[in-house]
Amino acid sequence: MKAFFNHLWQKMGLEEPAQASDSRLFDVSANGPESELRSVVPWSARANQIGASDLQADRAMRQLKALWSADKQMQQMPEKAVARLKKYMHFVHVPAGQEFIHQDEHGNFLVVLLKGQVAVERTQTWGERLRLSEAVPGEMLGEMSLLDQGLRFSACITQTECDMAVLTTEAMNEMVTEDAYLVACLMTVLARKMSLRLRVVGARLSERS
């Protein structure tokens, strides 16, 4: 995470550029051990596995803007910055009953739920399948693994037909190069959202231990 912010500050002219520039900050292959790459499933492959179909981008963006304007954390992201996300996102429809994020795989995409309901579950070491939460439209899923190249903490399964906006590592790397201000805005609200979610998940896991 520190490397990401150093790179971002350089892009915004707040710090002298380092001699070696990393334009693949969100790429697991550039940051993780080679032995772990077998668990990386790109969004293109996952989309085929779950039968995702494309949505009309303008309509999907209107959904996203409406949802985030009603969210206490996401509404702090400037409207013009939100609009610029359209260039970097994939908008898809996913059938019910599809596990689009798997536990313990390396993540290379995050998802914003636009319509429908998603179950967030974790299989404990002793085999119990624990329901952590049920995501509703406007929520982000999978953002932590996208940022730190770590393993997915939980699985996400569509309980109903769902519309989603997907942001991949490739798009994030492109965004860092082209629109550092947009990345800074996105990372600020992501940090706040993740902090709140970790507190809730931690409390639920403590209750079951």
Image: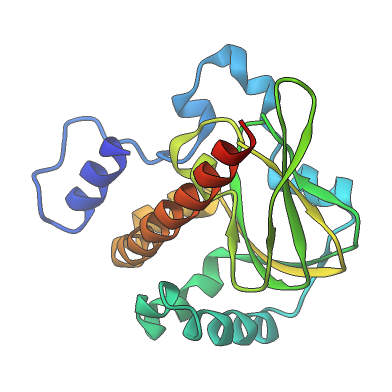
Give residue 173's position: percent from left, percent from top.
44, 48
Q: Quadrant of residue 139?
A: bottom right
Give residue 31's position: percent from left, percent from top.
44, 26
Residue at 53 percent across and 27 percent down: it is 29
Looking at the rendered image, the quarter that the N terminus falls into is top left
Side of 173 where 92 appears, left or right: right
Q: How is the image coloured?
A: rainbow
Side of 3 where 103 appears, left or right: right
Give residue 185's position: percent from left, percent from top.
33, 66
Side of 44 where 177 appears, left or right: left
Looking at the rendered image, the quarter that the C terminus falls into is top right
Residue closest to the eye, 126 or 173:
126
- 145 in relation to 97, above or below: above
Residue at 18 percent across and 49 percent down: it is 10
Give residue 207's position: percent from left, percent from top.
59, 40
Residue at 28 percent across and 36 percent down: it is 3
Q: Quadrant of residue 91?
A: bottom right
Tally of numbered discs: 0
Residue closest to the eye, 102 or 14:
102
- 70 in relation to 167, above or below: below
